Image (cartoon, rainbow, N blue to C red):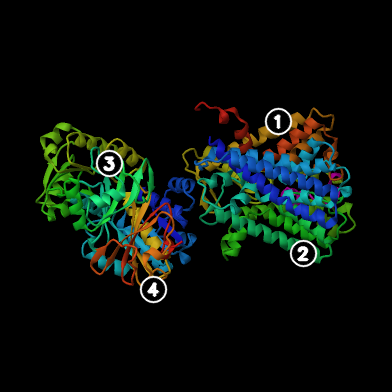
Amino acid sequence: MKIIVVGCGKIGATIIESLVSEGHDVTVIDKDTRIVAESVELYDCMGICGSGADCHTLSDAGIEDCDLFISVTGSDEFNMLSCFMAKRLGADHTIARIRNPEYNDHDLVFLRRELGLSMAINPELLAAREIFNTLQLPSAVKIEPFSRRSFEMIELRIREGSPLGGMSLIEMRKHYKQKFLICAVRRDDEVFIPHGNFVLKEGDHIGITASPGEIQKLFKALGLSKKKARTIMILGASRTAFYLSKMLLDGGSTVKIIDQSTGRCEEFCEALPEAIVIKGDAAHQEVLVEEGVASADAFVALTGIDEENILISLFAEAQNVPKVVAKVNREDFGALAEKIGIESVFSPRRTVANVILGYARGLQNSMGSKMETLYKIMDGGAEALEFNIQQENPLVGVPLKEITLKKNVLIAGIIRGRRPFIPSGDDAIAVGDMVIVLTAGIRVNDITDIIK
Amino acid sequence: MNYRMVLNIIGRIVMAEAGLLILPVLVSLYYGETTALHALLITAGIALAVGLLFVIVSRTKNRSIYAGEGFVSVAFAWMILSAIGALPFYISGAIPSYVDALFETVSGFTTTGASIIQNVESIEKSLLFWRSFTHWVGGMGVLVFVMAIIPGNTKGTMNVMRAEMPGPIIGKLVPRVKDTAKILYLIYIALTALEITMLYAGGMPLFDSVVHSLGTAGTGGFGIKADSIASYTPYMQWVITVFMLIFGLNFNLYYLILMRRIRSVLKSEELWCYVGIVVFAVAAITANVYSMYDSFSAAFRHSAFQVSSIITTTGFTTTNFDLWPGFSKGILFTLMFIGGCAGSTAGGLKVSRVVMLFKLIGREIRKILHPRSVNKISFEGKNVDENTLDSVTVYLVIYIVCFVAIFLLLCIEPFSLETNISAAAACYNNVGPGFAGVGPTTNFSAYSDFSTIVLSFAMLLGRLEIFPLIIALSPSTWSRKYR
């Protein structure tokens, strides 16, 4: 596909990188010569120096036969304008980054319709939602919900002394009667889809798919806490923090926000009267201790500086906070942070790139199934995809045991109507189903891509 | 330095060379030339074996190519390519000395067209074909070709392209390097085919049309007759003149024409400077040599042919321009250094660099007159950033330094100053013929083995635009210490 990306900042670069590695023809537009040169150097894309809201620049970039136009500059208004122009000049689909909370209320539907936007993305909101999900089940590393939350994909680290260590998947199935499926394992930076005889080890990351109810039961059986975090300490009064606090407060949790800047503290205080806002420098450990970090259920570090988030998270981890979440934008830092013991690391950039990647893949399909969600799980080593089966295709109606799937592909779950279930060999996919597919190491655009 | 990846790239290129040798093999089968066939088959076998060995030895997971790897692999690929490409001439006995055969092949791949063969017409046809085919392959670049055909997504292929493509600014036509390489080669093939058809339609034998078209396309200049193009009809000479000029233009312009963006083609500064230089040189030389020929049309044709041949650094000739007056020879000598446009198959400094250098001079004068003035240089309607300008000036400096070094090394030979300086210029700028002792009617066979090697190196320097070779041969690139 021909894709044009306007704005090559932190988020832009991640989007470009993942789109190029998916094999799309990407053209980058940015005002800064140096940044354009750098991205052309790093990724196999074309660079054009100029304004993304300029007819000449856009037609230089080949807007007439552009399939997807993405504008992710720092300015919402600019993104809307350039998407609007792109649409008028012939781009098929447009995506704009709109992150100002003012535009994200009821106005958003109106804006999207009037500007002809295919999608509006708000990285901060997406990140906040992802963190919020994780806080619902603090024992897991990550939670990724599929449609209508009837199915969830849980990433769990097998801690020392866990009953799962040394257990094979068949034994585990016999031991725990809940309906769940272990669909992926990450061990020593390698991700694979395990078979029944696979023996789990301490330190493994495992991916489990099941309905939320079954997961509650499984966690109970495993002796893991299944309570959601009620008292949460958030570091840094950022936009993400605002969205997250709002969701948490609406859910009835207690939220304490710490920030250095008086101005931002006051803004938060006005906007979120129920939150406790503390003005203080979190780099001073006394501040955290004084505010009772040790008794919090969860600690979330959301300042703009990766290093600060990692270091303070380590401190919180040392204070035995049950759940510590750190926002780390740079991916190499993220991997490091996980190595030194921070379990849950979030990269808003990655989240946004996944959403756009999923959308781009969805545009390519042809066989009447629509990709609803795409999650890169297990540090990007595997993908969980959700397909909406809209019409007949070679998979429909055939019992699963008669279908030969490609290597490293798994049908992890089916949602029929409102009822989620883990399919056995006798089940067959029907039109109208939501099908959850897990892949490691291969790219799937369409549900039919999984057949050998 | 990712040594394995460098070796891997070189291995693939050597294997590609084995594939390229299939064409001359077919030619030798067609003409029933057994000696040449043996020599070509042995060479293809060696190339395949060496390439496979390199590829197998260098299997690695780390497939990233950074700038260093790009430059080093380009430099070594060209050397090894020439070393193997010289074997058919040596094995078949067409050129008895291996050093001479190497000179001939380097001259081929670098699209120079300087020859040491005394009697061209006695050489077997398949070898003549291979000689001209090296021009065609070397013109657009071997690594670009390999990148266009090899599947897979290697990180950093842009670094290879930058090292091999001539000119100060390398632009991509389409987002992917691979697709850009493909488009360039398709344009190249189409234009070559067009020239073959036009020559053939004008009555040139098929073999001659193919060989001359390959020589023109790569702006090489190996002929198959002792008097180069002189014995062909004026129509054929005009066709070759026009195509030499066409291949001296930036290939991006042809892509723009294909995309129907004629307006941006006509706005190209480099195009108009190139045309201007050609028109001026043709007019001046025609006036100067008018009295030497029977008619105006002959004088015009010969000067047009020689000017196009020299500015695009091709090196075909239709007349012995060594007999021309000093003024005409002076113009031709200057044209050698200017060369064709960036992004073409021609050698020399490139018109775009010359234009930028003149703009830099203008800016310097403005700065002296108005010390507080703020000046930016624009080229092709775009602002040129300081880094590019710096590299253009530095390139000029290193270009002159290398030229002087080559010239001094040649002065060991007992030839006239004119012979030596024009031999250095003709090889360094990938032109081919020079003046006096290396003029159109003579060749480079008088030079000793030492000078032959110096000149071969000069041709590689000129084709790869100096830096790849210097980087590849400097000890700091290979040192295990951090520098």
The x and y percentages for residue B122 are: 89, 48
Please determine whether, in this image, residue A271 is positioned above or below residue B92: below
* Residue most extreme to the left: A274
**How far apart, in angstroms, are the residues tagged by discs 4 and 1?**
74 Å
In magenta segment, residue B321? yes
Hey, what amino acid is under mark 3? Gly
> Which marked residue is nearer to the observer: mark 3 or mark 2?
3
Lower position in the chain sequence, tag 4 or tag 3: 3
Is B83 in front, or is B323? B83
Label 2 marks a residue whose chain is: B
Which residue is tagged 4? A392
Q: Percent position (x, y) of residue B177?
A: 54, 52
List the residue tagged with mark 1: B405
Q: Secondary structure at mark 3?
A: loop
Q: Chain of mark 1?
A: B
* Residue at the disc numbered 2: B198
Q: Which amino acid type is marked by label 1?
A: Ala
Residue B401 lies left or right of residue B202; in this view the side is left
